[in-house]
Amino acid sequence: MLSNIVNITLSSLTVLAQIIVIYLAVIILIKKKTHPLLGRPFQWIGRRGMIFAFIVALIAMVGSLTYSDILGYEPCKLCWYQRILMYPLVLLFGMAIWRKENFILPYAMLLSTIGGAIALYHYTVQLGLVAAPCSVSGYSVSCAKVFTMRFGYITIPMMAFSAFMLILFLTMLSNKAQGGETVNETSDRL
């Protein structure tokens, strides 16, 4: 029962994250950042990018801990690498928001890019497109093991990939939107 609720909730949030990433990518590609209708949400999200990135990273961290510590899904080697890159983002964004600084944005972009690449690779392992590097390691569950599959394509690595990509886009937007502006000035407009 609990696993079903967690899976549906996190899978639905994953679809929402993917929709937002596609929207942001389309606006950037068609260069309509200042369009009266299309650009307004883009600019609103960009001004609050660091706060939204913190929320996404926090949900991803709580979700992964729920899967392992409450539902008992044993993380594989690639899952651990993704956690190593996701968990510090919560602390970095939290500290940056609290101290009203945005110097962490390049570091967050780097962690998100590497984490997204690992998550995408992990997803291809689960799809059987590449061999699992940890399937015979003997100390953890196989990286190819699929604990959950929702909507025909969402697995835990796809959730992680979507979270990393959304954090990356939000961080890039926040970096451009805040060009010299402090986080405090941004959060005052919330």
Image (tube, rainbow, N blue to C red):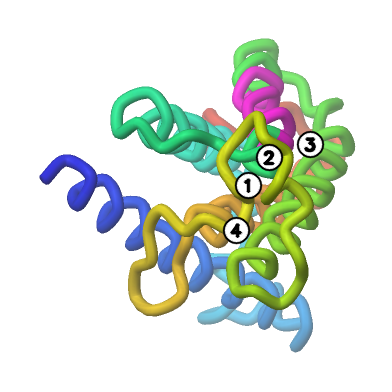
Q: Name the kind of residue labelled 3 in the image.
A: Ala
**Label 4 secondary element:** loop
- Looking at the image, which is closer to me, 135 or 52? 135
Which residue is labeled 3 in the image?
Answer: 108
Verify CB contact (< 8 Å) between mark 3 and mark 1: no
Q: CA distance from mark 4 to mark 3?
A: 28 Å
Residue located farthest toward the left when viewing the structure as drawn: 1
Q: Amino acid at mark 4?
A: Ala
> Residue 98, relative to residue 123: is it above or below?
above
State the count of labels: 4
Sequence order check, earlier mark of 2 and 3: 2
Q: Position of residue 17 (x, y in %)?
A: 49, 61
Specify the label residue 184 is tagged with.
none
Give the CA distance from mark 1 to mark 2. Answer: 27 Å
- Name which of mark 4 and mark 3 comes first in the sequence: 3
Between the C-alphas of marks 2 and 3, the distance is: 14 Å
Residue 132 sits above or below residue 109 on the image? below
Residue 155, position as x, y percentages in the image = 47, 61
Magenta part of the chain: 81-93
Mark linked to residue 82:
2
Mark 4 and mark 2: span between their CA atoms? 15 Å
Residue 21 visible in the shown view: yes
Q: Relative to 158, say whether 65 is above or below.
A: above
User: Disc 2 residue type?
Assistant: Gln
Residue bearing mark 4:
144
SS at badge 1: helix
> Considering only order in the chain, which callout, 2 or 4, is on the residue closer to the N terminus?
2
Lower position in the chain sequence, tag 3 or tag 1: 1
How packed is label 2: few (under 14 Cα within 10 Å), some, or many (20 or more)?
many
Label whose residue precedes the other's in the sequence (1 or 4): 1
